[in-house]
Amino acid sequence: MFKKNAVAAGMAAFASVALAAGCAVADGSKGSDVDITAMSAEELAEHLIFETNSFRDQEMQEGGNWSDRMTQDELQKACSFDNTREDLDGETAGQVVAMARAGYEAPESIELGDWRKGAELADSGFGYRMGHNNDDHGQREQGGNCYNCHVFDPRVSTQGTIGPSLENYGAQRGTSEAVLRYVHEVISNPHQYFPCTQMPRFNSDRHQLLTDEQISHIMAYLLDPESPVNNQ
């Protein structure tokens, strides 16, 4: 069961209430003889999501459809702790790091892009939202939404603190080849260093949320000596 999936969690909560109250929950499967009253709330949630065509078979912007987006890969499964586990154990952490590194493809060379474009991408949360008004990447490029979790420039008012502060990151670390490679690896697939982190995999074998060019711009915003990130 996937305890961290928000959709499944919501469905499980609904299922718990429905089952506890003795309510009938439509199965939705044509010709199905499935007895949903015998299922736990978690089993019913997964059944409603993946077996009954409850969600539209809509194409996702990263490829695939709704079901693909909600189906966990092996790394996500490894990071979905049950209620008896509070901390990540060493064996699971090692497996997650190994999967992340196997899914990372290093570019031939890593160079800094334009920090001004990187600032725009870090500020933008546009992209991959589905609903009545889907994000159209043909009209506007997707962003990284980095400000949602990190402080880059404290003079910018709308920044989050879920992740570590990145103020003066480049000023403190420089722009050596080792630093460039590390930062590219973390943005592309942070599980290589921080197993089961909440940070998205922006460019991995799972999907490509940002291109290498876009990542180079965000790296420039983070590392370029001229960037406001490094002039505080």
Image (cartoon, rainbow, N blue to C red):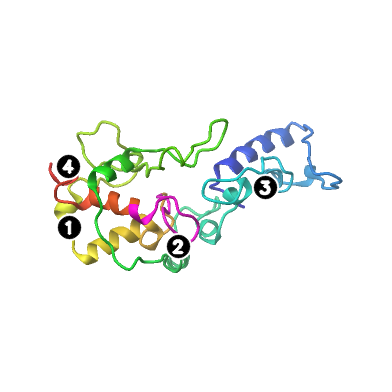
Numbered range of the magenta stretch = 199-213
Identified by mark 1, the residue type is Arg
On residue 89, the disc is: 2
Q: N-terminal of the two: label 3 or label 4? A: 3
Tell which tag, 4 or 1, sits nearer the viewer. Answer: 4
Q: Position of residue 201 (x, y in %)?
A: 43, 54
Residue type (three-letter) at the residue carrying disc 3: Glu
Secondary structure of the residue carrying tag 1 is: helix
- Give yes or no for residue 128 being in the magenta stretch: no
Q: First in sequence, mark 1 or 3: give its number.
A: 3
Quarter assignment of residue 118: top left
Give the mark nearest the N terminus, 4 or 2.
2
Element class at badge 3: helix
Residue 131 drawn at (x, y percent): 57, 34
- Residue, disc 4: 228
Mark closer to the chain start, 1 or 2: 2
